[in-house]
Amino acid sequence: MRLLSLCWLLAATPALAAPVQLKLLEWGYLPAGYEQQFADYARANGVEATVSRVEPLLTDFDSVYRALRTRSADVVIPTSYFYKAHHQPLFKLLLPIDFSRLHHYGEVKPALKNTEYDKQGERNYSVPLTIGMFSLAYDSKQVSEPPTSWRVLADSAESGQFAEFCDQFEPLLFSVLLSLGKSPALFASGEMLADQSLQQEVEQQLTRRLQASRGFWFNQTNRCEDLRQQTYATTWGLELVACNEQNHQQWRIARVQEGAIYALDALSIARHVADDPERLKAAYLLLDFLLSAPLQRQMLAGIPTLSASNIASRPPLSPQEQAVLPDRPLPAFDERLLVPALPAHIKNRYKRMVQQAISASGKESLSKQCPWDLAL
């Protein structure tokens, strides 16, 4: 009798649902252990969910597009200019964001709300996560006067003192145009292509800069062993504090007169997630977790050049972190200074310019290791 009662009880008890398993395509700068932290966060909010990182990591537009097309990722972190690139196909693969489902959206900095980079019609398709600044850095132990212009890279008397970023080509070409004292609007609109003398000036400066470089770096950070051999660096700043400690150098961000070059990474949900209400609920919880101040403080630790979207996210800077920054505050974020999304016909013209400069500079063999997409 007791056995029959036990069998009835087991049959009447509903089986626990398996946790929702989310797949996140990210750049690699999220803090170690965020996967378990999210599982705990979701459970505290009444949802059994886990997250795993998609490998290989996000590198460029194609890596995001492939992951969405093949449903290999549920949540992605594109850079701002990916959204409207290549005739805007990402919008067909993403969900518009319902901000009312995000508890921490109220803590997002006002300047990062109502953005245009991710808008189609009246809907936004992302939530801002982090803002990076593509920067010129210098080792202040070797350089007595801080550089004030990107031009120093092409005009350096001694070659081989820096390497060029090559996950994407846009920051390189954009910074070359700015180094000539030209408006960033000329890059976004493609107007510099209509001015033959300006185009030739940009091409010559780009070639000179590539000739002066020691090669290329990619995957978001310079290697410390490479920076040990350099005086200058192009950088997002993610590695500078660690490399200063490891190399006994003193890398600092230069305040260049041409102004900032920004990139913004944002959180988006794949359209296929809407087919499963429980998965969609878990995906919004993942976005909310990544927007929370505690997670963003962890993410920013040791990276003073990166800022995050939560208004309370910046932890106090250590002396080592403060030493990486210029004497004056970094400029405030301005969406108009984001690396722009380029129409396909303009982008292809720019790709051709970069290809020709690589060839003219003698850096073709070194550039083969780069993940940037220069195919026409």
Image (cartoon, rainbow, N blue to C red):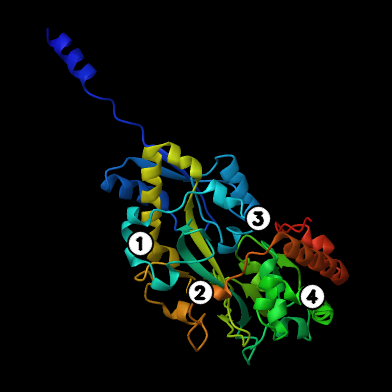
Camera-side residue of 314 and 85: 85
Q: CA distance from mark 1 to mark 3?
A: 29 Å
Q: Secondary structure at mark 2?
A: loop
- Residue at 63% from the left image edge and 64% from the top image edge: 341
Q: Is residue 317 left or right of residue 240?
A: left
Q: Secondary structure at mark 3?
A: loop
Task: Residue 209: name its quadrant.
Answer: bottom right
Q: Amino acid at mark 1?
A: Tyr
Q: Amino acid at mark 2?
A: Thr
- Characterize the local packing of mark 1: few (<14), some (14-19) or many (20 or more) Cα atoms within 10 angstroms: some
Please name the residue that numbered disc 1 is placed on. Answer: 105
Q: Amino acid at mark 3?
A: His
- Characterize the local packing of mark 3: few (<14), some (14-19) or many (20 or more) Cα atoms within 10 angstroms: few
Q: Secondary structure at mark 4?
A: loop
* Rendered image: mark on residue 145: none
Please name the residue that numbered disc 3 is placed on. Answer: 87
- Characterize the local packing of mark 2: few (<14), some (14-19) or many (20 or more) Cα atoms within 10 angstroms: many
Please name the residue that numbered disc 4 is placed on. Answer: 194
- Is residue 73 in view from this perspective? yes
- Residue at 25% from the left image edge and 25% from the top image edge: 14
The reply to whether dot 3 and dot 2 touch (C-beta < 8 Å) is no
Dot 4 or dot 3: first in sequence order is 3
- Residue at 20% from the left image edge and 13% from the top image edge: 7
Q: Is residue 23 left or right of residue 179?
A: left
Please name the residue that numbered disc 2 is placed on. Answer: 305
